[in-house]
Each structure stands twice: as structure tokens, then as C-alpha cells.
Image (tube, rainbow, N blue to C red):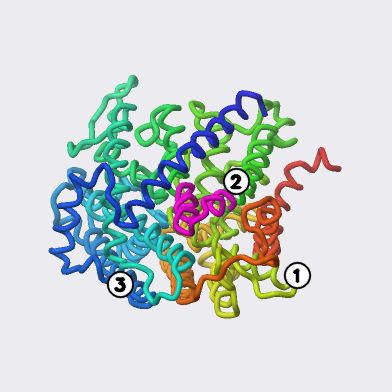
Amino acid sequence: MTVIGWIQILLYCAIVIALVKPLGWYMTRVFNGEPTFLSPVLRPVERGLYWIGGVDEKREQHWLTYTVAMLLFHVGGFLIIYGLMRLQALLPFNPAEQSAVAPDLSFNTAISFLTNTNWQNYGGESTLSYLTQMVGLTHQNFLSAATGIALAVALIRGFSRSSMRTIGNFWVDVTRCALYVLLPICIVYSLFLVWQGMPQTLGAYVEATTLEGAKQTIAVGPVASQVAIKMLGTNGGGFFNANAAHPFENPTALSNFVQMISIFTLGAALTNVFGRMVGNQRQGWAILAVMGVLFLSGVAVTYWAEANGTSTLASLGLSGGNMEGKEVRFGIVASSLFAVITTAASCGAVNAMHDSFTALGGMIPLINMQLGEIIVGGVGAGLYGMLLFVVLAIFVAGLMVGRTPEYVGKKIEAREVKMAMLAILILPLMYLGWTAVAVVLPSAVASMANAGPHGFTEVLYAFTSATGNNGSAFGGLTGNTLFYNLTLASSMFVGRFFMIVPAMALAGSLAAKKSIPPSAGTLPTTGGLFVGLVVGVILIIGGLTFFPALALGPIVEHLAMNANTLF
């Protein structure tokens, strides 16, 4: 660990925090339907889209109608992606003449991208055509990210409204998010990435001759446009198999730093949107503080573990930390920071191989995902996941003082607590349940590249990543089999939608409640006590659900790798 390394980390945090307020102000105006500086250009387009779709922008929806609209929207997304992958051999923009993708892999990939997971059991450059990458994956990157933000805004309305039966209009929220937030930023972002050296072309793959005289095919394509939304929308699916470690997806140290900033930008700004909509920006800053405490703790552990390496590496004469699986152009600090960011934000993009991290360094990304990826989290999904824990923390506080808990003027009662617990407990049910099946099923065990704790962690990481809609992989696991394609798809589906439905029910329940003024017995929810309470509840609930399985993997491996030092 070095001073320069910590300066990089603190500079990153400072830039993200500086962007929170202006972006929060802008997004609040967008979702409130107020004019913005882009309205003169985009407002006619917005009205035209409503006319084509037959949407009345002034007609709001009940939480159940809002949720059903969201689910039907995803049925269409699934059919588009699945159809493109199965038919890509017959469709244009396929210069590499990629064949049709197998049914089980197409199914897995379609579920993956519509749930904002972007788990990839394939290499993009060797499997997919340009048309599939653009119309299928990049298109869905926009819509899945817009859906997550729309759902977060709907839940915020539940807290901010009083005695109302509606929480907004799904079609309007998704349209405004894509049109006013995601698309303008990504246009500028894509141009920046092209400037940094990222390809953006529909031309054929390049044939090159190496210094030894051998022929080599260099894959190119419309990369920059996909990378921009994959990072901003916390999607994570790479154009290339090596993802953000590939020099065409992440050419320079500057592109790497900007990509890390873009992963957190919208998720962090949504906390400010929450504060503005409930009428007290300090509420948003308190939630961001909870995220910050958990994030910096994870960064400190990962950076320390990777910078120090292990006694086994030291015995081989490899000092200076663990560089295995990392790009030299990024180094230990940028790789460690990226790993924590991408798993805290449910992005799933990687610029280093998590499988090659030290045991404790690889444990933090796993913890981030098993906590529900609420540390900033996926755009929208992180905020509504965090608010579920806030509801539980307020409930615990109410039990301690013996009065009905309240949060931002709403009483938290049995229905709200039940919905929050239902949404949270579905996650460990999926990743622990499927991991238990996978480690005893011979065909699933055969996909593991390593035995012992490391092999177990490969499987646990895969199902945790899928259930948490992250998409990063620990590596070493052969996932393109019928068993893993189907089980990982089910994990992604349940992890996304079985959490969304209770969250929307919670939004509807809160919107229907009357707002009550704070009293002398109301717990202050903008100070350090509240931040500490929420952090404690997150760690206790998360620890009870993931620690028994977690302890069998990375911790055991850490003890084995450092046996010479410890004993």
C-alpha cells in the first residue's frame, strides 16, 4: 500500500461525491417532468414516442399496474435478444460469419441482459455478430438500466407521497430516463472512448501479420457505444471475452479511471434524488454515507490483501504484492479499486481476473454481492435495495425504544417489514441453494477447474453473481453447459424480479399512507447514529445469510496460502 495508491482512491471518491448533487438535481427535474436544458430538443421526441406507443403521460399507475407493465416490457426484451441470437447467421452486419447461438446459451444470455446481469458464458468476439451486439445487447443495456432507475424513482415516490394510490407511469419513467439521462451522457462518453483508442466500426475483423510472420485476426467492431452504456448503466457485459482487461475495451489509465467513475455516478446521484423528493437532502446524504462506509472498508481490505500478497508468493521470490491476473498498465491499486467498485455497483465489468486475487482480496467482491449489491449498487437497484435495509433498520430501532417506527414521515408497519424481508431473503435462497446442488452433482462438479476451497468459491461466486445481477465471474468455472446455463438463468431471473415485486408493493403501501410530522420520539435519520444503525443491520443480516458458506471458501484458502506465516 502506498500514499500514491490512496491518493488515487481518495481522488476517485471526491469526484464521485462532487457529481452527486448536480446529477441529483438534474434527474429530479427529469422525473418530476420539469423543463431541463435538453427539453427544447428532446421534448418533441418524447411526445412523439408517447403518441406512437399510445401512452398518456398524465395518467399514473397503481403499483400493481406499474409492475405488470414492467414485466411485460421485459417479455418483449427477452424475445428480441433470443431471436437475434438464434437467427444471427441469417441476419446482416455479421462480417465474421458467426453461426446461430445454441438454444440454452441464447436463453441464458437473453435472461442475463434483460435482468441487467450481463453474465456471459461465451466470448463476444467469437460468438456474436455486430447486429446482435448492437440491437440485442447494447439496446437492452439502455432499457434494463432505465428500468432499474425507474423502479427506484417509483419507490422514492412511495416515501414522498401521501394518501395516493399511484406511484407514477412506468412507460413515462423509462422513456425519460433513456432519453434525458442515459442517451445524452453516452453520446459524449462514447466519443471520449473513441478518442482514447477504442474501436467504433462496422468494418470486418482485421488480418495482421505478426513479427514472426504468422497471421492473426484482430477483432474490432462497434465497441465504444456498447462500453459507454455497459459502464454508465452498470451492465458490465463486455464486447470482448476479456472485458475491461482488453486493450480495445479499456485502452488507457485515463479510460480506466473514467469508467470507474461512470459505474458509480448515477447510483450515487440517486441518493440525492431521494433526498430532494422527500424534501430533505440530508436523508440522501445519510444513505450515501452508509454506502461510503461499506465501500471504503471493502477497498481497504482488498487493496491491503493485494498489495501484500501471500507468504506463498513471497517464498517464490515474488515480492511487491500480487500481480497475477492483473494488467500492468493498471497495477494493483487500480485493479483492486475496480474490483470493489464493480461488485459494489452490480456492474460486473472486470479489468483483472478475480480468480487470481488473494483469498481475502477475492472475498470482498463476494461479500459485496452477497450483501445484495446495495453499496451504490446497480443504477436504481442499489437504492431500492438499500431502502429495504433502511426499513428493517428503522423497524429494529422501533423495537428497541418500544414505539412504532417512522421514516421520512411514514410509519413502518408489519406489511412494509414483511415485504422488505421477503425481497432480501430471496437472494441467499438462490445462491446458497444452487451452490449446494452444484457441488454434489457430478456433471456440475466437472465444470470446476480447481478442487477444494477455491473450486467451491468458483461455484458460489457464480451463483452469487447471477442472483445479485452482477455478472462478473471468479474464473475457472466452465459455465457454458446445460446445467449452468439453466440454473444461472433462473438465479438471474429470481434475483431481479422476486426482489422488484415486493419493493413495488412496498412503494404502493407507503404512497397510500398519510405523512406524519416528526415528534420528540422520532429517531433522527440524518446523523451518525442512524448511519451506524443501518451499517450494523446490513452486516448482521448479511452475515447471518452468507457467512456459513463464505467461511468454507476464501477464508480457508487464505489460511492455507499463509500457513507459513500463521503457524
Task: Compare marks 2 and 1 and give the one earlier in the sequence.
Answer: 2
Is 186 or 250 nearer to us in this picture? 186
- Would residue 301 be visible to someone looking at this image? yes
Specify few, some or many for label 3: CA neighbours under 10 Å numbering under 14, 14-19, or 20 or more.
some
Tell whether 75 sits left or right of 47.
right
Q: Residue at x 59, y 68 (%)?
A: 428
Is 71 or 315 nearer to us in this picture? 71
Q: Residue at x 18, y 47 (%)?
A: 94
Looking at numbered disc 1 in the image, what kind of residue is underneath it? Met
Horizontal and vertical percent position of residue 405:
64, 71
Residues at marks 1 and 3, CA–CA distance in whole angstroms: 40 Å
- Residue sticking out furthest to the bottom: 414
For label 2, the residue is 292
Secondary element type, mark 3: helix
Quadrant for the N terminus, please: top right
Secondary element type, mark 2: helix
Secondary element type, mark 1: helix
Count the labels in the image: 3
- Would residue 434 be visible to someone looking at this image? no
Horizontal and vertical percent position of residue 173:
31, 61
Specify few, some or many for label 1: CA neighbours under 10 Å numbering under 14, 14-19, or 20 or more.
few
Q: Residue at x 26, y 27 (%)?
A: 208
For label 3, the residue is 69
Q: Is residue 95 above or below residue 176?
A: above
Find the magenta span and give its range. Answer: 267-286
* Label of residue 400 in the image: 1
Task: Compare marks 1 and 3 and give the one earlier in the sequence.
Answer: 3
Residues at marks 3 and 2, CA–CA distance in whole angstroms: 34 Å
Horizontal and vertical percent position of residue 233:
38, 49
